[in-house]
Image (cartoon, helix red, strand yellow):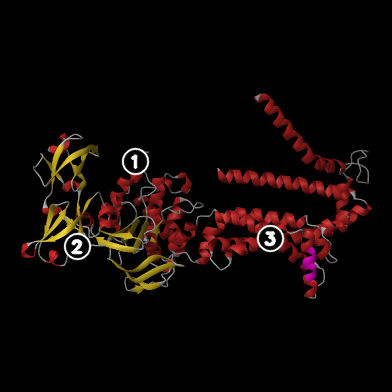
């Protein structure tokens, strides 16, 4: 009985791994295929698409825009989320309960509606689509996520640590820099990564708010109509591999720190 | 690691580590949280350099009192003075006060020596001087060998000593201790009580300790304040508090007590008798008698109740049980005036009497405490 149960769970895990990774592996495999279209038509091995990336200025520009947007979004959303989380946990103010609840509402809202809403609001202010409205939209969209992420950490932070720091003569800045920050730094990092990835992959809001500077998801979306260039597959593969390396690096570092 | 190792403070405290105490004066201090009054209007003076303990059950307002002195809360009304300075509006980091927190609140990301040096770093003490002071305070709590360890790698007793060293390193005029021994096991706790008292003598600061454990308060403090539902109901030295409490609450809280409610019956020559179930238990005379009428409670500690052969004492009774606890005999007796407990070190009648046997109960008039009405 026990053996059969193990057999079954092993089978299930194998199935999940295949389902999850098959598309990624397919993309990676086709990036080495000597055929200029995104179809399963194996012709031969080539690395030329990787050298092609440098020539595709449209892709490179889009990547640059998306990375910049992601970093700016992540920095702002993490700062706002952390500050809000701290205030919600440590400070007392009127309607605190309702504010906590309303801060999470955007999570439940369809992005399409949020996009239309922001666009309408912008037009009321007389602002057209562009990089700044898109940044504002992305910050608005990702902050509830960073807020929830930081809330879990700050709720777990013993308030008497801050009391002890104050008690020993530390001022507000010292208490933050010497006690609070070192204890939440990994959560800040995680929250930054989360916001970056949400922004980097975001298409719906970008459709409404992006101006002439198109983000990577927008460019890829447009390319789908004319065919995905193999250079994009090569770029995607590079990104997946580097992400995996970074993830492995972080896990190893964390394990070392914990030990 | 043995228990004595874990509680050992090296008490050859250098002059360099000494501080000196300061008085704390609370005038009309009150603390409300919304409609709830955590501390009713309180006047209190804690003397320079004394070991003061605030004793009370949970919710009695003792922690609120400590937070107000430490600067973690501001009073709703009233003023707090430390020495000659009014600190009512002063934040915790500006007060000459340091705290040993109940949870110890050691900084988890800093090593033992960085924890101890934290306050000195905030005060911008030069590195060389800071290192030397940290070294001495670590030696004082006997943790030199753990200087570079993180707090989570320490035992409970060691963490507690780091918390003590960290608080004392800023040379506070006042050291607040919030249930400092609560998380330690019994043996270690008893050893630490003794060490705390020696440390207090050596350092010289005013120590204020909050606890719900009457043994802890009574064994270490010079004076004890008993708190109940947001107010201080009695302040006295431990022995006074034990031998002649004024209120029933304090009397019961600091130790086992026989408390009997009596009728006051006027006698001749201004004397008044205290009578219960038709038996005269005590006589009041002088000014004590003059202003008392109606009913009154008397308190007799179990060790002051003596047992003798039937009809040898004040009241006859039947032994309900005879227990041997911590080297003493606790005899529980059913009498016409109620159930009484006597405690003795097994001499005389009490070690022999078995359940069901008849005894007589008595006490010296000096050992009767007439409680105030509350």
Residue A241: which quarter of the image?
Answer: top right
Residue receiving disc 2: B294
Q: Which mark is residue B3?
A: 1
- The quarter of the image holding the C terminus of chain A is top right
**In this view of the protein, which residue sits in the foreground, A251 or A112?**
A112
Q: How far apart are the alpha carbons under marks 2 and 3?
A: 67 Å
Instruction: Give SS at disc 1.
Output: helix
Q: Position of residue B216 (x, y in %)?
A: 30, 51
Q: Position of residue A74 (x, y in %)?
A: 70, 59
SS at mark 2 in the image: loop
Query: Residue at (81%, 61%) from the top-left corner?
Result: A206
Q: In the image, is B240 to the left or to the right of B146?
A: left
Left or right of residue A197, residue B321 in this image:
left
Cα distance between the residues tagged 1 and 2: 54 Å
> Any magenta on residue B4?
no
- CB-based contact (under 8 Å), mark 1 and mark 3: no
Q: Nearer the viewer, mark 1 or mark 3?
A: 3
Residue B233, image x, y percentages: 29, 62
Question: Label 2 is found on which chain of the structure?
Answer: B
Q: Residues within 10 Å of mark 1 (few under 14, many from 20)?
A: few
Badges 2 and 3: C-beta atoms under 8 Å apart? no
């Amino acid at each position: 009985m026990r053996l059969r149960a193990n057999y079954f769970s092993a089978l299930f895990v194998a199935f999940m791994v295949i389902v999850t990774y098959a598309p990624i592996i397919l993309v990676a495999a086709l990036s080495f295929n000597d055929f200029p279209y995104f179809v399963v038509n194996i012709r031969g091995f080539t690395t030329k698409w990787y050298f092609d990336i440098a020539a595709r200025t449209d892709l490179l520009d889009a990547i640059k825009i998306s990375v910049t947007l992601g970093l700016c979004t992540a920095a702002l959303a993490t700062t706002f989320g952390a500050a809000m989380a701290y205030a919600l946990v440590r400070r007392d103010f009127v309607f605190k309960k309702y504010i906590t609840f309303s801060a999470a509402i955007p999570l439940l809202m369809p992005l399409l509606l949020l996009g239309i809403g922001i666009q309408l609001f912008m037009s009321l202010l007389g602002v057209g689509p562009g990089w700044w409205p898109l940044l504002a939209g992305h910050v608005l969209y990702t902050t509830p996520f960073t807020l929830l992420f930081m809330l879990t950490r700050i709720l777990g932070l013993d308030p008497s640590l801050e009391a002890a720091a104050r008690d020993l003569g530390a001022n507000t800045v010292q208490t933050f820099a010497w006690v609070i920050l070192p204890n939440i730094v990994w959560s800040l990092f995680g929250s930054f990564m989360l916001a970056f990835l949400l922004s980097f992959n975001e298409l719906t809001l970008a459709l409404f708010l992006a101006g002439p500077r198109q983000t990577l998801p927008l460019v890829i979306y447009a390319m789908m109509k004319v065919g995905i260039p193999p250079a994009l597959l090569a770029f995607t593969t590079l990104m997946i591999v580097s992400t995996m390396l970074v993830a492995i690096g972080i896990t190893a570092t964390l394990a070392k720190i914990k030990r | 690691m043995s228990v004595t190792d874990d509680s050992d403070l090296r008490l050859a405290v250098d002059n360099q580590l000494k501080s000196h105490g300061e008085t704390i004066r609370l005038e009309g201090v009150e603390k409300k949280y919304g409609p709830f009054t955590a501390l009713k209007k309180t006047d209190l003076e804690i003397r320079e350099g004394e070991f003061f303990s605030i004793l009370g059950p949970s919710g009695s307002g003792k922690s609120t009192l400590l937070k107000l002195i430490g600067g973690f809360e501001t009073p709703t009304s009233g003023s707090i003075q430390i020495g000659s300075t009014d600190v009512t509006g002063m934040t915790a980091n500006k007060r000459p006060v340091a705290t040993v927190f109940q949870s110890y609140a050691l900084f988890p990301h800093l090593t033992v020596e960085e924890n101890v040096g934290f306050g000195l770093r905030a005060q911008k003490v030069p590195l060389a001087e800071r290192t030397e002071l940290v070294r001495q305070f670590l030696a004082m709590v006997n943790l030199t060998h753990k200087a570079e360890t993180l707090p989570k790698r320490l035992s409970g007793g060691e963490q507690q000593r780091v918390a003590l060293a960290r608080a004392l390193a800023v040379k506070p005029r006042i050291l607040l201790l919030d249930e400092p021994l609560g998380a330690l096991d019994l043996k270690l706790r008893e050893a630490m009580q003794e060490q705390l008292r020696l440390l207090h003598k050596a350092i010289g600061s005013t120590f204020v300790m909050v606890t719900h454990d009457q043994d802890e308060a009574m064994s270490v403090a010079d004076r004890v304040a008993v708190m109940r539902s947001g107010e201080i109901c009695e302040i006295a030295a431990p022995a006074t508090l034990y031998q002649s409490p004024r209120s029933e609450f304090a009397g019961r809280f600091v130790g086992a007590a026989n408390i009997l409610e009596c009728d006051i019956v006027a006698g001749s020559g201004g004397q008044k008798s205290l009578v219960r179930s038709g038996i005269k238990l005590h006589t009041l005379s002088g000014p004590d008698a003059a202003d008392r009428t109606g009913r009154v409670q008397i308190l007799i500690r179990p060790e002051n109740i003596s047992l003798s052969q039937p009809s040898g004492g004040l009241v006859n009774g039947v032994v309900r049980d005879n227990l041997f606890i911590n080297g003493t005999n606790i005899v529980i007796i059913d009498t016409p005036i109620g159930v009484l407990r006597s405690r003795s070190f097994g001499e005389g009648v009490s070690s022999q009497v078995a359940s069901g046997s008849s005894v007589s109960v008595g006490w010296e008039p000096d050992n009767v405490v007439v409680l105030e009405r509350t």
